[in-house]
Amino acid sequence: MAPKRLTSRQKELWSEIVSSKPAAWFDAANSALLLGYVKSIVSHEILTSQSDAIEATLMEPDADLKRLNRLHIMIERQSRLIQTFATKLRLTQQSRYTPATAAVMAGKASGVRPWDEGK
């Protein structure tokens, strides 16, 4: 169960991530990592949304390029945090396969791609 102090979006992500793994994957020892991972993802989403709004006005003379640059720096920092948390929680592909196994699995790709779901 997601911690009560999380926002609704953070709880949603927490549930998605926890339900995507076997029951014993997460324990009390790595709950802080999962908490950081979820918060980093939501922060990244918020920053990206703000960046998108500014990028939509780039052709206008009053476009806030300094703010956009600061947002891009923060987005990059959040991306690195997300990657670090995902690696530490063993959620990335590289943490699950040896290089040889990964090559074999890549050749056997099947099923619906995540970006094709819901089409």
Image (cartoon, rainbow, N blue to C red):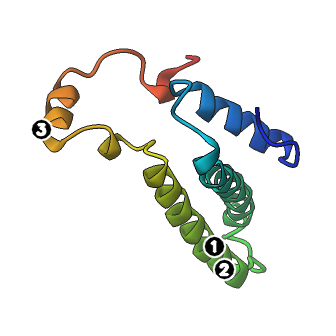
* Residue 100 tag number: 3
The answer to the question of whether label 1 and label 3 lie on touching residues, with beta carbons closer than 8 A, is no
**Residue underneath mark 1:** 74
Distance (Cα) linking label 1 and label 3 = 35 Å
| Quadrant in which residue 78 is drawn | bottom right
Which residue is pictured at 85% across the width and 46% down the height?
7
Determine whether label 3 and label 2 are within 8 Å by CB: no
For mark 3, give the secondary structure. Answer: helix
Front: mark 1 or 2: 1
Quadrant occupied by the C terminus: top right
Going by the numbered disc 3, the residue's amino acid type is Ala
Residue 77 relative to residue 12: left or right = left
Name the residue that disc number 2 marks.
70
- The 10 Å Cα crowd at callout 3, few under 14, some 14 to 19, many 20 or more, is few
Disc 2, SS: helix
The answer to the question of whether label 1 and label 2 lie on touching residues, with beta carbons closer than 8 A, is yes
Residue nearest the observer in this picture, 100 or 56: 100
The mark closer to the camera, 1 or 3, is 3
In the picture, the quarter occupied by the N terminus is top right
In the picture, measured across the screen, residue 55 lies left or right of residue 76, that is: right
Which amino acid, mark 2? Arg
Q: Residues within 10 Å of mark 2 (few under 14, many from 20)?
A: few
Residue 111: x and y in percent read: 37, 15
The image shows residue 68, relative to residue 47, as above or below, that is below
Q: Amino acid at mark 1?
A: Met
The residues tagged by marks 3 and 2 sit, at their Cα atoms, a distance apart of: 40 Å
Q: How many marks?
A: 3
* 38 or 52, nearer to the observer: 38
Task: Tell me which residue sits at (19%, 41%) in the image.
Answer: 98
Q: Would you identify the image quadrant in which residue 15 lies?
A: top right
58 left or right of 100?
right
Nearest to N terminus: mark 3 or mark 2: 2
